[in-house]
């Protein structure tokens, strides 16, 4: 196991221990210690994704959170985004070809957040870990072989940081904005179809901005 992966696994273990230690210690005056949240926004690739010319993508997430204390939250979420790039080339088998690639990513995230109320707003920041499954779909138009498609997938783990603010619309409903930056290990997707490489060897690092809406219960 690499040093980076050991650090991520260690962070996850530490967060689980915190959850066990603080579970049930929600402040007595909090009659709605749980929340569900929907997040919609954009993902901007950096590092290897940017080097491979993947474009800005769409991001969609959902999360469940629980207040461990008035100022400490553990949040579990499902996170998804997709990015695209185009590749042109030629070889002896397919002739000239155009390759339209879509990298679709689904993740399971756990985040520990600190939150401070400021009037009707709640300012927060946090750290977390995630497990990601990524699928590379490639639609290929070739001069000699016609049109065809292929896909392959791989899994990686990663870490992230978040910061943002939520505004209380009522005591139950809230809306806000969140920024996230994530780092991951490298994917290893490597296929060859008609001598055309369908591959991505790199991380899923990048930042996202989402608009959020949720309710407490």
Image (tube, rainbow, N blue to C red):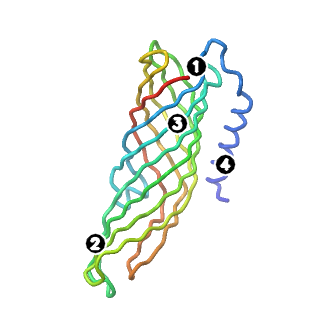
Mark 2 vs mark 4, CA separation in Å: 40 Å
Give neighbour class at mark 4: few <14, some 14-19, many 20+ (Cα, 10 Å).
some
Quadrant position of the N terminus in the picture: bottom right
Residue 161 vertical position relative to residue 204 in the rendered view, above or below: above
Q: Along the horizontal axis of the image, is 126 left or right of 214?
A: right
Identify the disc placed on residue 32.
1
Residue identified by numbered label 4: 9
**Disc 1 vs disc 4: which is toward the camera?**
1
Q: Which of marks 3 and 2 is nearer the N terminus?
A: 3
Give the structural element (helix, strand or loop) at label 4: helix
Q: Nearer the viewer, mark 4 or mark 3?
A: 3
Looking at the rendered structure, the secondary structure element under dot 1 is loop
Query: Crowding near pointer 2: few (<14 within 10 Å), some, many (20+)?
Result: some
Measured Cα–Cα span from mark 1 to mark 4: 31 Å
30 lies left or right of 94:
right
Pointer 3 residue: 63
Residue in the picture at 56% in, 23% down: 217
Identified at 56% across, 50% down, the residue is 158
Give the Cα distance between marks 3 and 1: 16 Å
Q: Single out the residue that lies furthest toward the bottom.
A: 92
Q: Residue 98 carries which label?
A: 2
Rounded to the nearest angstrom, the CA distance separating label 2 from label 1 is 53 Å
């Amino acid at each position: 196991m690499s040093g980076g992966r050991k650090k991520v696994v260690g962070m996850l273990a530490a967060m689980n221990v915190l959850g066990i230690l603080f579970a049930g210690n929600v402040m007595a005056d909090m009659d709605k210690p749980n929340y569900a949240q929907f997040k919609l926004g954009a993902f901007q690739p950096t590092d290897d994704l940017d080097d491979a010319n993947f474009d800005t993508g769409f991001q969609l997430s959902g999360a469940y959170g629980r207040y461990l204390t008035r100022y400490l939250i553990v949040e579990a979420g499902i996170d998804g985004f997709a990015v695209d790039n185009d590749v042109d080339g030629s070889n002896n088998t397919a002739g000239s070809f155009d390759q339209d690639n879509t990298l679709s990513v689904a993740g399971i995230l756990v985040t520990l957040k600190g939150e401070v109320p400021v009037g009707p707003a709640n300012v927060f920041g946090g750290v977390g870990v995630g497990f990601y499954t990524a699928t590379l779909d490639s639609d290929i138009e070739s001069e000699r072989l016609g049109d065809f498609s292929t896909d392959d997938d791989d899994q990686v783990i990663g870490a992230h940081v978040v910061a943002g603010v939520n505004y209380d619309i009522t005591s139950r409903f809230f809306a806000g904005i969140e920024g996230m930056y994530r780092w991951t290990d490298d994917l290893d997707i490597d296929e060859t179809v008609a001598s055309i490489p369908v591959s991505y060897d790199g991380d899923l690092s990048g930042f996202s901005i989402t608009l959020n809406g949720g309710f407490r219960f």
